[in-house]
């Protein structure tokens, strides 16, 4: 069971660019090339459809070369912003997959937490990684 809100998530081009570490022009190219869907909001600003962005990122991630060869050192506590790519829920627990750059992070959280945070495919979320677990929270908005 997937939990949906009545308003599908959408994001400003500049927010998507900053989140993914690319330029606004790159995001606009993805829109022009129909890799992701976008529409203008009531103020005339272009907003990227969160679900199509998530699908595009998953596809891009699958096409990337495995980066496991590169060693990375990180602290025991990190906050990683990304796009929710999958939410699989049952009555008690949910599996949430967050995609950011070349990372895919899967967290098992209560379905109640998913509901309270409003997490759905295309939402922006923050994974907090500690030594033995990953928790999700919503980013501070501007």
Image (spheres, rainbow, N blue to C red):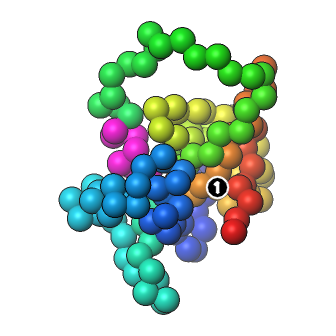
The residue sitting at the left extreme is 33
Q: Secondary structure at mark 1?
A: loop
In which quadrant will I find the C terminus?
Answer: bottom right
Q: Is residue 31 visible?
A: yes
Q: Nearer the viewer, residue 76 or 124?
A: 76
Q: Main secondary structure of the magenta part?
A: helix
Q: Residue at x 29, y 31 (%)?
A: 63
Q: Residue at x 36, y 70 (%)?
A: 38
Left or right of 142, for residue 50: left
Front-most of residues 24 and 77: 24
- x, y percentage for residue 105? 58, 33
Residue 11 picture location, percent across and down: 51, 66
What segment carries the magenta color? 54-60
Q: Is residue 66 above or below residue 119?
A: above
Give the class, few, some or many, for how many residues have Cα within 10 Å of label 1's Cα (few <14, many ≥20). Answer: many
Which of the pair 16/24 is nearer the observer?
A: 24
Q: Which residue is labeled 1 in the image? A: 119
Q: Is residue 3 left or right of residue 91?
A: left
Which residue sits at x=44%, y=72%? 47
Q: Is residue 47 left or right of residue 38?
A: right
Residue 49 percent location from the top left of the image: 43, 65
Residue 94 visible, this angle: no
The x, y position of residue 98, in whole percent, is 57, 41
In the rendered image, which quarter is residue 37 located in? bottom left
């Amino acid at each position: 069971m997937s939990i949906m809100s009545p308003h599908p998530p959408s994001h400003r081009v500049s927010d998507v660019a900053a989140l993914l570490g690319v330029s606004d022009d790159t995001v606009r190219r993805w829109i022009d090339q129909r890799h992701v869907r976008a529409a203008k909001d009531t103020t005339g600003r272009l907003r990227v459809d969160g679900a199509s962005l998530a699908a595009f990122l998953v596809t891009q991630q699958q096409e990337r070369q495995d980066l496991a060869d590169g060693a990375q050192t990180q602290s025991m506590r990190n906050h990683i912003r990304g796009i929710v790519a999958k939410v699989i829920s049952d009555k008690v627990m949910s599996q949430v997959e967050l995609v950011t750059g070349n990372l895919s992070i899967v967290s098992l959280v209560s379905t109640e937490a998913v509901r309270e945070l409003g997490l759905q495919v295309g939402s922006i979320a923050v994974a907090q990684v500690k030594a033995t677990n990953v928790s999700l929270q919503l980013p501070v908005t501007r």
